[in-house]
Amino acid sequence: MSKEAILKIEDQELSFPIIEGTEQEKGIDLRTLRSKTGYITYDEGFGNTGSCQSEITFIDGEKGILRYRGYPIDELAEKSDFIECAYLIIYGELPDAEQRQAFSDRIGRNASIDERMHRIFEGYPRDANPMAILSAMMTSLGSYYPYLATNDRSTDLANFDEAAAFAISKVRTICAASYRVSKGLPIMYPKKDYDYCDNFLHMMFSNPYDEFPKGTLQGKALNLILLLHADHEQNCSTSTVRMVGSGGANLFASISAAIGALWGPLHGGANMAVIQMLEEIHASGDDGSKFIEQAKSGTSGKRLMGFGHRVYKNFDPRAKIIGQACDELLNELGIEDPCLDIARKLEEAARADDYFVSRNLYPNVDFYSGIIMRALSIPLNMFTVMFAIGRMPGWVANWKEVSSQAKGKISRPRQIYQGPTIRDYVPMDQR
Ligand code: ACO
């Protein structure tokens, strides 16, 4: 097969090399297009644009495949845990026992945040959105630990292991602290003998005379959710990390920007939107059938939240795993959630409906994750910060990858300008 693509523009015929990935994904290398022709590519939403070459995560949306560093997500979900996957995603290989211990210890050691940061939480209104707090606190970490956030690439890379552990560890401390303060409760300090997920639940829900125990089903379920969210190649927030990191910004600033990108309902905010939708359907007495019709009409402004994906056009492998885990957890905890019944009915109806089938709209990871989080007593306005905790290893790994490129370029897309052409300035009294 020819390893080049021929492009004919006006009278010019040009050839461009084909780049092939290790999973036989093919791309046309157009890096010289503009200098050779003056043309640019136009690809709104970047659906056909490869912004980088990456070794971290592979997705085949047509086949429903997701792999972290080559390992299938279903195998990792069954055999691994969030912290091991974080190591794998960031460093490229599964850790041996010593590496795993050192990584866990480093995360454990860095769970607390500077005491002066505690006072910042108090300054927020009680109903402040936890995503706003998280984004601000994440970039603020760089001010409390400035040696990890110099914006000098070689220094920041030299201190990367510590900065990565800080980001992964402190994100859950910040999220739990924002919750406690919003409820008027004292901030809980992390416990040395609790693992990552148990510690988060402890910092959220323990009280001086009633400690959240370790080794619970809730901790196990949380571990699965975080693992399934740990990376997802060039999605909106991860591309943001790379975009910001490409300019040389430190890890915490790059992640803070990604938290903003994650916030929207078409991305990480979808897990909240799913529960809001299910609660609305329940409150209206609908079993889901009316809502499905509205979502199909295209005029109601409604979408079946938790359905559809830019990349997966067959099924989202994470949704399969999470749907099953959701049933198991609710059974084991003896919780009856009417939202789960409605979700099941919506899924069944949508999967038999030509509108959804013909557009390849299947449940995505968010469709059932919200129901699990409700069962864990995570409040609705914290669902997207839970996604952020889970996505941290992916953001960290992508920042490292982009920052480590010897000849990395700053990300700077072009545009096709459609505004007014040159015109004379009009003085105020003549407008
Ligand atoms: N409900 C109803 N119709 C839908 C839905 C949906 N959830 N998603 C897409 N469609 C329809 C569109 O109206 C469009 O129909 P048309 O061809 O008749 O115009 C067609 O399917 C294609 O939709 P696009 O918006 O062009 O698809 P795109 O790939 O750009 O969007 C997205 C993907 C944003 C995820 C979309 O499916 C959506 O809004 N889903 C609901 C929100 C959601 O669950 N987001 C979470 C994504 S996963 C994540 O970030 C973790």
Image (spheres, grey):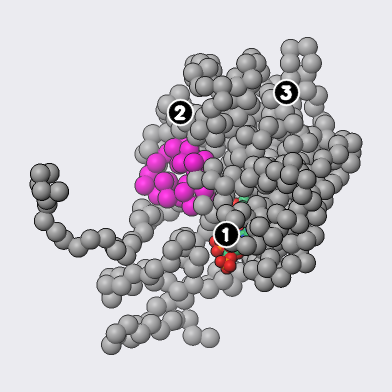
Residue 339 location, quadrant = top right
Q: Is residue 192 left or right of residue 110?
A: right
Q: What is the number of the mark on residue 140?
A: 2
The quadrant in which residue 180 appears is: top right
Amino acid type at image mark 2: Ser
- The residue labelled by disc 3 is 205
Quadrant location of residue 181? top right
Which residue is the extreme one toward the bottom? Answer: 11
The residue segment tinted magenta is: 237-260
User: Label 1 belongs to which residue?
Assistant: 299
On screen, residue 41 above or below 218: below
> Magenta region, mostly helix, strand or loop?
helix
Q: Residues within 10 Å of mark 3 (few under 14, many from 20)?
A: some
305, 88: nearer the viewer? 305
Q: Where residue 366 sits: x, y (%)?
A: 68, 49
The answer to whether residue 342 shows anywhere in this view is yes
Q: Is residue 394 above or below residue 375?
A: below
Which circle's residue, 1 or 3, is located before the other in the chain? 3
